[in-house]
Each structure stands twice: as structure tokens, then as C-alpha cells.
Image (spheres, rainbow, N blue to C red):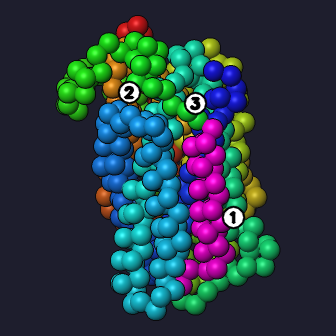
Amino acid sequence: MNFWGLWNLSFGFFGVQIAYALQAANTSRIFATLGADPHSLSYFWILPPLMGILVQPIVGTLSDRTWTRFGRRIPYLFVGAAISVLVMCLLPNAGSFGLTVSAAMMFGLVSLMFLDTSLNMAMQPFKMMVGDMVNEQQKSKAYSIQSFLCNAGSVVGFVFPFLFTYLGIKNTAPVGVVPDNVIWSFYIGAAILILCVIYTTIKVKEWSPEEYAQYNEVQNEANEEKVGWFTLLRQAPSAFWAVGLVQFFCWAGMMYMWSYTPGAIAEVVWNTTDTSSTLYQEAGDWVGILYAVQAMGSVVWAAILVQFKNTKLAYALSLILGGLGFIGVHFVHDAYLQFIPFLLIGCGWAAMLAMPFTLVTNALQGYGHMGAYLGLFNCTICIPQIVAALLGGSILHFIGSQQSLMMVVAGVLFICGAIAVPLINTKHKK
């Protein structure tokens, strides 16, 4: 497949990632603004991975069996994106309808649940289409393009609130109401999402069942469909589980970043814990800039990663750099010097985006059921986030309720992930 074929295959991911970036940078900010206690913030983050663990294996399995004139994976992609657009217009308005604090948070939770469900439904088909239509030699390139688009979309989504504040849209609001700059960020992000997905829908023509069987060496599609999830897991290659262990540590660390970065930056840079203050909202805008720096660091590091001949060395080194970045957040008190820790975090993030799916899809060559396997592999992303979210409040109490120390916890988890990388067996069935 030529470059533009690989590009078109993943371009819609740019829009999906804008939506994810807005969610990642602003969920804790939104619920803190609505009145959530810091020790409860991680509980709100249970919904994204929970929806992922429920939705993605189902989407993977159903799309394995779906053959329509619109494609195999694209129907799920388009429906998920359409629902996402609607919910993105509702979530940031949770505090604008005159509801009580508890009712506003419940409205926000329901909106977040539907947003997570639809974004998971929209995201997974992109990885599956690469697994379906790209050969082993080009998969690293395909996932690198996807990683670039992911990070580019992240940069756009992360900077929106800061940019809109700069353009004159207010970043303050009455107590319990989400500021206009965040609301408009979600509106514009929703518009870009649907346009990008429409582009991919028009440009990509998925293979017919006969073409898929020919190029993926599948002999009997009917027999494939009868295999259950537990059977697939029993038959999974060892790399599937070893990469999953690395994923456990890394995604638990990312959960703490998303949950506690707004509070951590407000503490160590703006010296405030008052979520109703102007300083807290300024810190919230700056978090978007730091996340954008992280994403740009990921783009640069992703280009460096492809130069490594030893994949596992590159993976482990990236995670160590990311871990050091997380630990550094706690010790840096200048807003601009925080760029350094977040650039290092970007190194770890680049490896997390590209390497696990490359290692796993290569290991799965000849196994069939690519969509189902990738849906199940998504559990190695979702389960650690759920565990981390459930434990987050207790850990925060244990370390003295200082949110910046949760970044240190995240750093230690990343380093544990790096230690587990040598367990991955890169030899796989041909």
C-alpha cells in the first residue's frame, strides 16, 4: 500500500483523537468545577476504560462477522463518531442547566458514559483496518502514521481551551458551571471529528470477504466465527500476555496522569487547591498546553523510535524516560520548565501508541480473528485503568492528599513497565 493509502486508512483517527484529548484534559477539570472532591476524581475515570472493556471486544467480534457494501469496520466507525458528536455537545454543559450539584454530576456521568462508549466504537475500527489490510512489513509504518495523527489530533484538542481564552472566550464562570472556553472546545472538536470520519469513509474501500481471506490466509471464515473469546485467549501467543503485562503498568500510570494533572499543576505551579478560583482555571488551561507539549514530544520521539533495530530496547528506554518525566512533575514549580517533564512523558506515550499493537499484530499472524483479538487486547488497556481508578482515592489518602505525588506514583509504574519489557517473546508463528 502506498503512503496515501496508509494515510487515508487512519486519517479519521485525527478527529477521534481530538475528542479523546478534550476528554483527557478536561474531565477532571469539569467534575472538579461541578464540585467533586479530589479524592473522588479517579472514580469518575472508571467509566472510560469500563466502556472500552465492554464495547471494544464486542465491536471487534461483530465487525469480524460484518460484510456490507459500506465495509466491514467502517459502519461501526461511522455510527460511533455520529453518537460522539451529539454527546460532546452535552457533556460540558452539565453545569449550565440549573441542576443541583448532584444532578449535574449525574448528568455529566451519563454523558461521559455515552461519550466513552461511542468513542471506543469509533476508535477500534482504525486499528482493525490496519490489521486487516496492511502486511507485516508495513504495519510499523502504518501504526507510526496512526501515532502521528493521534498526536497531531491530541495537540489540537489539548490547546483548544487555552487558544479560545487567548481569543477572548471566557475561562471563568459561576460556581458549578463549566467555562465557555471549554464548552466551545468540545463544539469545535465535535465538528472536526465528524468531518475526518466522513473523509475516511469516502476514501477507504475495505476488502471483500474473498480479498480478505486471500491476503490474510484465512481458509474457512465460517469456522472462524464459531470460536469463543475464552478459546481465543487460551490460544493467544505468549507475546499477547507479556505485552499485556507491560500495558498494565503503563496504563495505570496514565490513569493517574489524566486524573490528577490539573490538581497537580495547580498545586506545584499556581499554589492553589481552590477549584472555584481563577488560578485553578488558569492552571486547567495550562494543562492543555502541557499535554500538547507531551503530544509533540511523542511525534518527535516516534520518528526516533523507528531508527532503533532492537524493538524491546526502544520500548523499555521510552518507558523509563516517561517514568522520569512523571516523577519530575512533582519537583518543577515553573510553568514553562514543566515542558521538560512532559516532553519525557511524550517519549513513553509514543512507545505506548506504536509498539504494543505492532508486537501483538505481528505475533497474531496466522491466528485469524484479528478484530476479536484486538478487541480482547484492548482489555490490557482498560483493566489497569479500572484498577488504578478504584485505588486512586486510597493511594491519594495514603500519600497525604497531595495530587502532585500521584505523578510520582505514575512514574514508578512506568519504570515497572520497562522492567517487564524483556519478558516479551518476539518470535511468533508464521
Quickly name the residue at label 2. 370
Amino acid type indicated by mark 2: Met
Q: Which residues are magenta?
A: 177-203
* Quadrant holding the N terminus: top right
Q: Work out whether residue 202 or residue 53 is closer to the camera in this orientation and state it.
A: 202
Residue 143 badge: 3
- The mark that comes first in sequence, 2 or 1, is 1
Q: CA distance from mark 2 to mark 1?
A: 36 Å
For image coordinates 59% across by 67% down, the residue present is: 186
Q: Is residue 344 left or right of residue 421?
A: right
In the rendered image, the residue lying farthest to the right is: 167
Main structural element of the magenta stretch: helix, strand or loop?
helix
| Residue 19 sits above or below residue 252 on the image | below
- The mark that comes first in sequence, 3 or 2, is 3
- Helix, strand or loop status at disc 1: helix
Residue 18 lies, in percent from the top left, at 61, 55
